[in-house]
Structure formats: C-alpha cells, structure tokens
C-alpha cells in the first residue's frame, strides 16, 4: 500500500481510484471542482487549480507517484511534481501530445503516417494551404476533445470563417480522410522497462464522440488481423519514441484502401479501453496503478468478446425536443445478463456529456453484438453499428 496521486477529477480518474484502491493504495486527487467524479471516491481531494504551487506540493508530499487523467494539465505542473516524486506521463511527452501540431510532427518523425495536414497559425497559412486539404477538418491545436473545437469545412472560405470563429488560435487543417473504420491500441510501459499491449479495439464515433468500442479475438479475416498487428507495432514504437512510462492510447484510422494512419495519441487510459475493465485479465486502470506503484504489469488477455456502449446525457431526455430529465431504466438494461454498468456519479446529465458506459461480455462476438442491441434498446439509445 501507500498513496498514489492524480491530477484531474473526471471519470477516468474515478475508475483509476477504484482500481488503485482494490490494490490496497490510497488515492489523492487534485482538482479545482468541489464535486467531481474522482474527488467523490478519492481518499483525499485537494481542491486546487492544476498549477497551484501549494496544492502540487501537498500532492507530492502525500504520494509516492502522481499521474494524470487528462492531457490538458499544464506540462509545467508535471515538471514541478517530477522533482519530488515519480510522475507519469512525463512533461515532455504531454507537451507533444497536447499540441496537435507537435503531435503530428512527432508521429511523422517516427516514420508513421498521419493525415495530410498544415499548421494554421494565421489566416495567411489558410490561404497558402494546399488544395488537397479541402474538404477537411479544422481542429484547434490545443484543448479539444470529444470533437469540440473542430469544424468540417468544404472550402477555403469556410475554413477562414471557422478559424475566425475559433478566435484565431493555432489550429491544424487536416484533409478529410476516406475512413473504412477506426481502431485504437492501449498499452502500458512500466518504469522497470516491461511493456504490455491490450487487444485492439474497433471504434464507432457519432458526432465526434466515441459511441461503441468492440474487442474480439484476432479474426480469421487475414487483412484485418494484419492491420491489427501493424497498429500494435506502431503504437509500441510511438511509446518507445516518446520514452513513455504508464498507460497510453493511440487512435488509428483504417482507410478505404487498407492503409493505416495515426489520428492522435492520448497519454492515459482511454475511453476505447473501458472494455478491459470487464473483458481482460487486468483493466487499463489497474495497469496504470501498477505502473505508478512500481508493481509488475498484469496480463492483458481478452477473456471474452466485448462491446462497450458509451452512455451520454441524451438518454436522460425522452426525445430530442424534451427539456425534462428522467432517470434511464437501468434495471431494463441490467436484465441482460451479459451487461455490466458503470456510472460516473455526474449530477448534471447534459446532452453529449459522458455519464457512464455499459460493457457487454459474451461467449461469442455475435452474442455480444445482439445483447448490446438489446441493452441499447432498453436504454433508448441508438442501436450499435
Ligand atoms: P477525442 O475525444 O478522441 O480526444 P478529439 O476531439 O481529439 O476526440 P479527433 O479524435 O481528432 O477528436 O476526431 C474525432 C473523430 O472525428 C475521429 O475519431 C473521426 O471519427 C473523425 N475525424 C477526425 N479527423 C478526421 C479526418 N481527418 N478525416 C476523417 N474523419 C476524421
Ligand atoms: Mg483527442
Ligand atoms: Mg480522438
């Protein structure tokens, strides 16, 4: 036992707390909110800003190791903490992945493909951007998530308008890629040099937000299996190139022509790895706790096929027009015996807000899919694709 620390109080932090506590550790969470998903279950909630000197000092004093649950923590805070205790992710890695321009440059420097793109720091960059980037997606370089700070644009004029709308902050313009499907790889690297990889997840997004992740044994489909192997290898070389310790996720696009490109890196457990909580020997959160505590990393084997459905605040509303909220029928979803529910303890069920997830674990992928459809119907969610 001992104390592990966490910068950030969201749902990823909450699930980290649960995992660390199961291993006999106490967790201190630093987050400015007085009520946050992780703060509610932590052993200590230090209510302070992410760059607050006194708060960071208290966290470092209390804990043998500190990690984060979102990538937008100030890199300087990680640097300060690292002079006093073990820290993951390292400030240098975070500085790269929290800036889409630096991130894409780094990935390409590792010999791994990214979408054709241009750094947009001023209107002149947009006027000079190659025609091949239209139609495209303009993304703010920093602080975007769940598709926020992104605009799909068809023309240069639309891009100029979107750039102005974002307030002229640094952006990346990416070509709109012909996606066949999306996959992600979660891996963990211990401070002892050990490294493990979780099974590849296949992901479906709706409105820029992850909706469904599926994990299944490597398929008999040779082309798909080969892509999974390539993605796993690319994720490992990215982590190695970053000199990374802890849990990391790499999101990939599989294009219509079968080629693979990296979309982005998350320096932490990832929504697409939530299935590991119920379907793998070790969850991604336990893996993060083990890495921080200096314990051996756990096995990552998939115990059974799994389908994870994200639960957004939308299902608290009867219809698209409804203004009145009502609690979803959890009992109806849990009547499906393969379903495992995880709620994050958020009070305000806003539309588009991640409130929880539900994972269906079944003997076959076919059953996991059909049970997931039953769960979705029970909760009034769109059927999983
Ligand atoms: P996250 O919550 O994963 O951090 P984000 O806000 O950083 O999301 P991205 O991962 O960049 O957003 O994009 C969200 C989704 O939008 C992608 O998963 C993909 O479905 C779609 N998308 C993003 N970039 C492109 C692209 N260049 N071409 C086609 N689709 C794209
Ligand atoms: Mg992102
Ligand atoms: Mg993403």
Image (cartoon, rainbow, N blue to C red):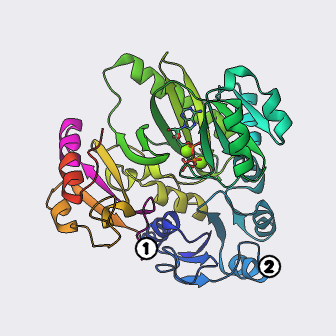
Examine the rendering and report whether any part of residue 243 can be seen.
no
Q: Residue 279 appears at what percent x and percent y?
A: 32, 49
Query: What residue lies at 61% left-to-right and 60% top-to-bottom?
Result: 70
Classed neighbour count for the residue bearing mark 2: other residues with Cα under 10 Å, few (<14), some (14–19), many (≥20): some
Is residue 168 placed above or below 45 in the rendered structure? above
Q: Residue 280 appears at what percent x and percent y?
A: 36, 49
Looking at the picture, tell me which residue is in the foreground, 318 or 191.
318
Indicate if the residue with disc 2 has its beta carbon within 8 Å of ligand 2: no
On residue 361, the disc is none
Query: What residue lies at 16% left-to-right and 63% top-to-bottom?
Result: 332
On residue 53, the disc is 2
Q: Nearer the viewer, mark 1 or mark 2?
A: 1
Image side of residue 180 versus residue 135, left or right: left
* Residue 114 within the magenta-colored segment of the rendering: no
* Residue 360 within the magenta-colored segment of the rendering: yes
Q: Residue 367 appears at what percent x and percent y?
A: 17, 41
Q: Residue 153 appears at what percent x and percent y?
A: 62, 35
Magenta range: 345-372
Count of residue discs: 2
On residue 346, the disc is 1
């Amino acid at each position: 036992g001992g104390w592990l620390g966490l910068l950030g109080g969201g749902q990823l932090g909450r699930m980290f707390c649960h995992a660390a506590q199961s291993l006999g550790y106490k967790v201190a969470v630093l987050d400015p909110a007085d009520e946050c998903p992780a703060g509610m279950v932590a052993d200590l909630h230090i209510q302070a800003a992410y760059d607050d000197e006194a708060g960071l000092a208290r966290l470092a004093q209390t804990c043998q190791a500190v990690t984060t649950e979102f990538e937008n923590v100030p890199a300087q805070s990680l640097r300060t903490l690292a002079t006093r205790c073990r820290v993951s992710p390292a400030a240098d890695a975070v500085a790269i992945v929290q800036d889409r321009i630096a991130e894409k440059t780094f990935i390409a420097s590792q010999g791994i493909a990214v979408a054709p793109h241009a750094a947009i720091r001023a209107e002149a960059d947009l006027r000079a951007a190659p025609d091949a980037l239209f139609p495209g997606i303009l993304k703010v370089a920093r602080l975007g998530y769940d598709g926020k700070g992104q605009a799909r644009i068809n023309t240069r004029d639309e891009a100029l308008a979107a750039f102005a709308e974002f307030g002229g902050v640094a952006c990346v313009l990416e070509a709109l890629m012909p996606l066949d499907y999306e996959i992600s790889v979660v891996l963990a690297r211990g401070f002892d040099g050990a490294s493990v990889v979780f099974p590849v997840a296949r992901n479906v997004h709706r409105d820029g937000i992850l909706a469904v992740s599926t994990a299944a044994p490597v398929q008999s489909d040779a082309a798909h299996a080969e892509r999974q192997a390539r993605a796993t290898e690319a994720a490992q070389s990215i982590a190695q190139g970053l000199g990374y310790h802890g849990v990391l996720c790499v999101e990939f696009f599989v294009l219509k022509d079968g080629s693979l490109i990296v979309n982005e890196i998350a320096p932490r457990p990832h929504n697409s790895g939530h299935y590991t909580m119920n379907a793998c020997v070790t969850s991604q959160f336990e893996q993060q706790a083990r890495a921080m505590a200096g314990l051996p990393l756990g096995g990552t084997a998939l115990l059974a096929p799994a389908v994870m459905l994200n639960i957004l605040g939308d299902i608290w509303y009867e219809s698209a027009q409804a203004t009145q909220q009502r609690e979803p029928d959890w009992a109806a979803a849990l009547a499906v015996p393969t379903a495992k529910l995880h709620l994050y303890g958020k009070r305000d069920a806003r539309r588009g807000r991640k409130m929880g997830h539900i994972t269906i674990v079944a003997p076959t992928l076919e059953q996991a899919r059909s049970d997931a459809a039953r769960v979705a119907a029970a909760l009034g969610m769109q059927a999983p694709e």
